């Protein structure tokens, strides 16, 4: 069990340092706020989330995957598939679950209030990729455990999925520049920063697009893909219309954010949530 956590932590630290160096060397946009304001809050939330998950769940999801494999639970164990195919399908199907979970957190107003904390960042860099409300993280872990049991995802599939999810979340939130030709190619295999940045637009119709974290296919297949923001990447405004004050970027404010102010027009299905024009 400790080996599983060590692998995840080592991969996280490697990608963290890589993205920090990349952003410093080739920033895509000029940040509005100083890192000294945003990073303590964003990284503080990440540390709190990690501590809560380890305290409450420990290695339970990985242990559940081992149990499912041994007991023959789940969809993937119902068929005589090669081991490598079970791992590949496990990673892909878990990614689909996370895509659908993300859509749900935009569609259900109560869940959106939790998810607002992620979108209320006034800048967009790799630390945004770990900025989720602790209650949302705990709910997400419960959904993952249910998915692992229902799918019968092999332990290796779950481990690879978690490593990829953490790495791609930092990558696709990166304030980094990619050559346009390379970005167009990469978008067919992984969510790129320019693709995901659209999702952090202040415009509701753009916020409710490009939900993928790792694989970009679900947005294209299910009709939620948007190529670029209407105002362009340099002209778009990041964040939520109702939370544009710097004072809301401190750790205490962020933890209380779901319980302060309104949800705006952002929840999917609410009037105005599909609008694409600039405010």
Image (cartoon, grey):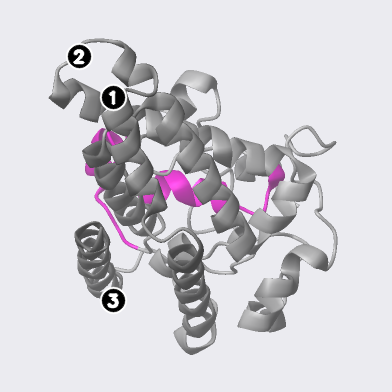
Residue at (44, 60) in percent of width and height: 129
Magenta stretch contains residue 182: yes
Quadrant of residue 104 within the rendered picture? top right
Does the residue at mark 3 contact the one at mark 1 (Cβ under 8 Å)? no
Q: Which mark is residue 89?
A: 1
Q: Which x, y percent locates residue 122? A: 59, 69
Q: Residues within 10 Å of mark 1 (few under 14, many from 20)?
A: some
**Mark 1 in CB contact with mark 2 (< 8 angstroms):** yes
Q: Reply yes or no: does residue 37 show up in magenta.
A: no
Secondary structure beneath label 1: helix
* Rendered location of residue 119, percent (x, y): 61, 58
Q: Quick check: 256 above or below 251?
A: above
Q: Residues within 10 Å of mark 3 (few under 14, many from 20)?
A: few
Q: Earlier in the sequence, mark 3 or mark 2?
A: 3
Taking the view exactly as shown, the residue that stands out farthest to the bottom is 36
Disc 3 to disc 2: CB gap under 8 Å: no
Q: Which of 118 and 238 is in front in this view?
A: 118
Residue 276 appears in the rendering:
no
| Residue tagged 2 | 81
Relative to 251, is 125 above or below?
A: above
Q: Nearer the viewer, mark 3 or mark 1?
A: 1
């Amino acid at each position: 069990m400790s080996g599983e956590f060590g692998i995840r932590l080592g991969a996280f630290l490697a990608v963290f340092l890589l993205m920090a160096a990349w952003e410093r060397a080739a920033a895509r946009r000029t940040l509005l706020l100083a890192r000294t304001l945003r990073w303590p809050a964003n990284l503080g939330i990440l540390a709190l989330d990690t501590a809560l998950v380890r305290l409450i769940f420990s290695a339970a999801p990985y242990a559940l995957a081992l149990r499912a494999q041994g007991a023959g639970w789940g969809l993937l164990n119902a068929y005589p598939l090669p081991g490598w195919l079970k791992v590949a399908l496990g990673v892909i199907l878990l990614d689909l679950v996370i895509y659908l979970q993300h859509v749900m957190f935009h569609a259900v107003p109560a869940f959106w209030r939790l998810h607002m904390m992620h979108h209320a960042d006034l800048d967009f860099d790799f630390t945004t990729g770990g900025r989720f409300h602790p209650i949302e993280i705990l709910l997400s872990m419960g959904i993952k455990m249910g998915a692992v049991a229902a799918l019968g995802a092999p332990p290796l599939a779950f481990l690879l999925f978690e490593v990829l999810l953490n790495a791609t979340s930092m990558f696709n939130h990166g304030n980094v520049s990619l050559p346009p030709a390379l970005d167009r190619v990469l978008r067919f295999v992984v969510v790129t920063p320019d693709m995901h940045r659209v999702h952090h637009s202040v415009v509701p119709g753009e916020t409710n697009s490009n939900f993928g974290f790792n694989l970009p296919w679900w947005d294209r297949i299910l009709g939620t893909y948007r190529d670029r923001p209407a105002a362009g990447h340099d002209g778009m405004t990041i964040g939520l219309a109702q939370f544009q004050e710097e004072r809301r970027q401190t750790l205490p404010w962020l933890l209380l954010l779901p319980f302060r102010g309104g949800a705006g027009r952002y929840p999917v299905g609410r009037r105005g949530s599909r609008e694409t024009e600039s405010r």
